[in-house]
Image: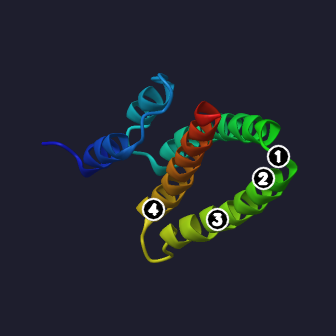
Amino acid sequence: MVSVKYLMIAGLLAAQPSFADDNTFSACMEKSGGVTNSMVDCIGQETKSQDVRLNKAYKEVMASVSSERKKQLQDAQRLWLKYREANCDFYYDPEGGTIARVNANNCFLSTTEARAKELEGFNQEN
């Protein structure tokens, strides 16, 4: 019989965006065995990697646009940061059990990855 924990891990792995060609995250999640703290640690490590990617893409876009556009991007990025925080905090339902913590952290990771990809798209257009 397949345990609920393993089904939860499989669901999280399937729902993940494709993180750069790195199998480290998937391996970490599989190794976690469905333990909340371990899964949150894996998500946290991958979020750090995606945050580095995001910051690199942001700096590259900032370097490639006019002064007026820099201000627009800076304003948009500040609002996006507030949105990410508010939206992902909503996932941390105090009545949602331990999976709510995983869901909130997963939201933060997937949102960060999506924004990095979006900004990288701007770099490819210019």
Q: Nearer the viewer, residue 24 or 51?
A: 51
At label 1, the amino acid type is Ser
| Residue 69, numbered circle | 2
Q: CA distance from mark 3 to mark 4?
A: 19 Å
Which residue matches tag 3? 85
Residue drawn at (47%, 22%) of the image: 21
Q: CA distance from mark 1 to mark 2?
A: 5 Å
- Upstream in sequence: badge 4 or badge 1: 1
Which residue matches tag 1? 66
Q: Regarding mark 1 in the picture, which secondary structure is present there?
A: loop
Task: Tell me the quarter of the image containing the N terminus.
Answer: top left
Q: Nearer the viewer, mark 4 or mark 1?
A: 1
Q: Regarding mark 2 in the picture, which secondary structure is present there?
A: helix
At label 4, the amino acid type is Thr
- Upstream in sequence: badge 3 or badge 1: 1
- Residue extending farthest right: 67
Residue drawn at (81%, 51%) of the image: 70
- The answer to whether the residue labelled 3 contacts the one labelled 2, judged by CB atoms less than 8 Å apart, is no
Q: Percent position (x, y) of residue 8?
A: 31, 49
- The answer to whether the residue labelled 4 contacts the one labelled 1, judged by CB atoms less than 8 Å apart, is no
Q: Regarding mark 4 in the picture, which secondary structure is present there?
A: helix
Residues packed near mark 2 inside 10 Å, few (<14), some (14 to 19) or many (20 plus): few
Left or right, 72 with reference to 92: right
Q: Nearer the viewer, residue 49 or 75?
A: 75
- The answer to whether the residue labelled 1 contacts the one labelled 2, judged by CB atoms less than 8 Å apart, is yes
Left or right, 108 with reference to 29: right
Q: CA distance from mark 2 to mark 4?
A: 42 Å
At label 3, the amino acid type is Glu
Q: CA distance from mark 3 to mark 1?
A: 28 Å
Q: Nearer the viewer, mark 3 or mark 2?
A: 2
